[in-house]
Image (tube, rainbow, N blue to C red):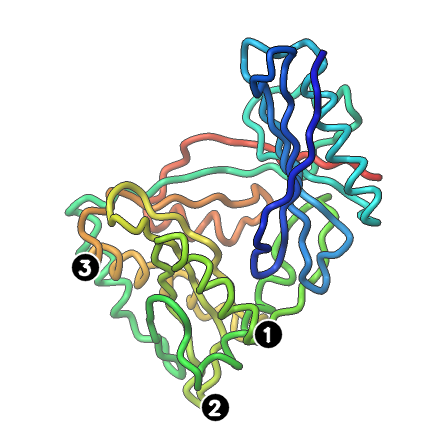
Amino acid sequence: MVQITALREPEPGPSSYRLAWVATGADGHPVGLAYLRVPTAMGAEHRAEAEIQVHPAERRQGTGSALLAAAVDAARGLGRRAVTTGPVTGDAPFLVAHGFRPVLNLTFSRLPLTEAVAPRMATLAEESHPGYRLHSWEGTVAGDLAPTFAASRRAMDDMPMDETDVAAEVWDVERVRAIAAAVTKRGDILCTVAAMHEADGTIVGFSELVVPGDGVGDAQHYGTGVLPAHRGQGLARWMKATAVQHVQDAHPRIGGLLTDTADSNVTMRRINDSLGYEPTHRSVLWQLDL
């Protein structure tokens, strides 16, 4: 018989904490794990994110169901109204059987950082965008830019999320600094390119990606957004191209850049296509309404 033991991460993250459960078999050996990420940021207190892992040899014996039940019960006890999981590639009969429904289709893409990419990105990065300029940094945003950078995070409020139960989250200087610190603490490098409105010096858009600390492998895009009043100026592609150029110059051993985009986010998909990102696979985010 499987035994479920509850755990909790000793240190919460900058905007969430994580609960965990370990499933052990009759011999005491672990056979599965469940995680529940519990967001704490204002605007995200209604949801949670579950992840279930069961050893292939131990599946179809009720272990996954027991772990999922523990995670869902915890989310319900915390007053959450929705639990998401995934993205999942392919069919998900286990999730269907437990009441989850597909809420967001995602396309994952990769830009190979070949020598041919550099001159093309340099050309795009040098394009003129009257009234705007770009500013780049690694790690934590400088103090004088922090307030306007935090305010620019509102650019993600209307990002297409289809049927996913999400709401606009509140960002402040403390939160953006804490996230940058968390990336640094785990040994990775947060790279940011921001678009600044020259008329008032405010940040009106940003593009973030994370480079592995050892500088090898693939870097991961975290998000790109432009405030509504400044859209239609080509700023998103300008920032992304500049970010690519920065990675190739500062981290030459990185082989590619990874990104995932909602299928309904037509604008960002078009930008990715124009920059040469190549689709690798499609996945689905699933949600259980509590």
Q: Mark 3 vs mark 1: give the one in front.
A: 1
Q: Which residue is mark 3?
A: 249
Residue 2, placed above or below residue 151: above
Label 1 environment density (alpha carbons within 10 Å; few <14, some 14–19, many ≥20): some
What kind of residue is marked 3? Asp
273 vs 250, nearest the viewer: 250
Residue shown at the point (64%, 63%) measured from the top left: 157
Residue 20, placed above or below residue 63: below
Q: Secondary structure at mark 1?
A: loop
Quadrant in the rendering for residue 237: bottom left
Quadrant in the rendering for residue 141: bottom left
Q: Extreme bottom residue here?
A: 200
- Point out the tag, 2 or 3, that comes first from the N-terminus: 2
Q: Which residue is mark 2?
A: 200
Q: Is residue 146 left or right of residue 36?
A: left
Q: Extreme front residue here?
A: 27
Q: Secondary structure at mark 2?
A: loop
The quarter of the picture where the N terminus appears is: top right
Residue shown at the point (17%, 47%) measured from the top left: 116
Q: Extreme left residue here?
A: 115
- Point out the tag, 2 or 1, that comes first from the N-terminus: 1
Q: CA distance from mark 2 to mark 3?
A: 30 Å
Q: Secondary structure at mark 3?
A: helix
